[in-house]
C-alpha cells in the first residue's frame, strides 16, 4: 500500500491568507497549517504535529522552501529528518523533490543555494526597514506605532470638546494624531462619529 500525501502551509501572522499556498500544494489527505514567523521551531505546533504524524512512504508537499524553514540549517535539518524516516519531501515552486535513500548532489546544492537566497532576501528587507526608520527619525517624522487612547482619555477628550476646545489642541495634548482622536471618538458612540467629522 502506498503512502499518503500531506501538505504543510505556513504564514507569518494570523491575518495572512493561506489560499495561494493551499492552491500550490494541491490535493492532500491532510494539511498542517502554522501561523507563526517560523524563527523558532518551538513556535510551530503544526510542524511538530506533521513530524509526529507522517510515516514511512508518505509525502510532504510544501509550496516553497521558505515556508518550511527560515534558515538554511533548519531547512536541511527538517528535510534530512523526514527523508531519514522514509518520507518524501516536495517543494512545488522550486520543483525540487527529496526522496528517502537517494543522494542527489545537485538537489542538495540547490537546497542550500536557494535556501540561502531566501534567507538573504529576508535580511535585506529587514535592513531596508531599519534604514527607513533611521532616515525618518533623522528627519523628525518617525512616530513609531500609532498610540491608542484608553477609555478615560476618550471621556476626557469628550468633556474638553464639549467645552469648546478644538480637536487639534486636544490631540496635541494627548500626544496623538488628530485621526487617532477622531477614530477614538467615532468608536465610542454613534453620536461622536458624526461630530468627529467636523474640525
Image (cartoon, rainbow, N blue to C red):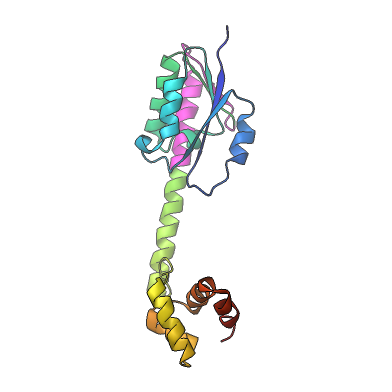
**At which x and y percent is residue 97?**
54, 22
Does residue 168 appear in the picture of this structure? Answer: yes
Where is residue 138, by image quadrant? bottom left
Task: Please state if 139 lies on the left or on the right of 8 as rendered.
Answer: left
**Above/below status of 68 relative to 165:** above
**Above/below status of 149 relative to 19:** below
**Above/below status of 199 relative to 14:** below
- The residue closer to the viewer here, 57 or 167, is 167
The residue most toward the top is 1
Residue range of the region highlighted in magenta in the rendering = 93-119
Identify the residue at image location x=47%, y=33%. 68
- The residue closer to the viewer here, 74 or 2, is 2
* Magenta stretch encompasses residue 102: yes
**At which x and y percent is residue 101?**
46, 11
- Which quarter of the rendered picture does the C terminus lie within? bottom right
**At which x and y percent is residue 23?**
64, 35
- Which quarter of the rendered picture does the N terminus lie within? top right
Amino acid at each position: 500500500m502506498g503512502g499518503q500525501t500531506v501538505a504543510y502551509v505556513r504564514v507569518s501572522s494570523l491575518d495572512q491568507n493561506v489560499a495561494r499556498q493551499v492552491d500550490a500544494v494541491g490535493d492532500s489527505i491532510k494539511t498542517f497549517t502554522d501561523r507563526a514567523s517560523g524563527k523558532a521551531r518551538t513556535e510551530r505546533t503544526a510542524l511538530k504535529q506533521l513530524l509526529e504524524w507522517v510515516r514511512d512512504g508518505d509525502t510532504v508537499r510544501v509550496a516553497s522552501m521558505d515556508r518550511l524553514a527560515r534558515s538554511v540549517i533548519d531547512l536541511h535539518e527538517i528535510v534530512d529528518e523526514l527523508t531519514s524516516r522514509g518520507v518524501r519531501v516536495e517543494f512545488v515552486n522550486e520543483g525540487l523533490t527529496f526522496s528517502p535513500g537517494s543522494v542527489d548532489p545537485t538537489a542538495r546544492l540547490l537546497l542550500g543555494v536557494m535556501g540561502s537566497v531566501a534567507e538573504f532576501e529576508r535580511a535585506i528587507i529587514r535592513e531596508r526597514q531599519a534604514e527607513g526608520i533611521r532616515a525618518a527619525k533623522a528627519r523628525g517624522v518617525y512616530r513609531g506605532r500609532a498610540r491608542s487612547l484608553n477609555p478615560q482619555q476618550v471621556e476626557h477628550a469628550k468633556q474638553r470638546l464639549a467645552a469648546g476646545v478644538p480637536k487639534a489642541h486636544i490631540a496635541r495634548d494627548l500626544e496623538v494624531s488628530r485621526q487617532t482622536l477622531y477614530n477614538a471618538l467615532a468608536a465610542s458612540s454613534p453620536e461622536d462619529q458624526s461630530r468627529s467629522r467636523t474640525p
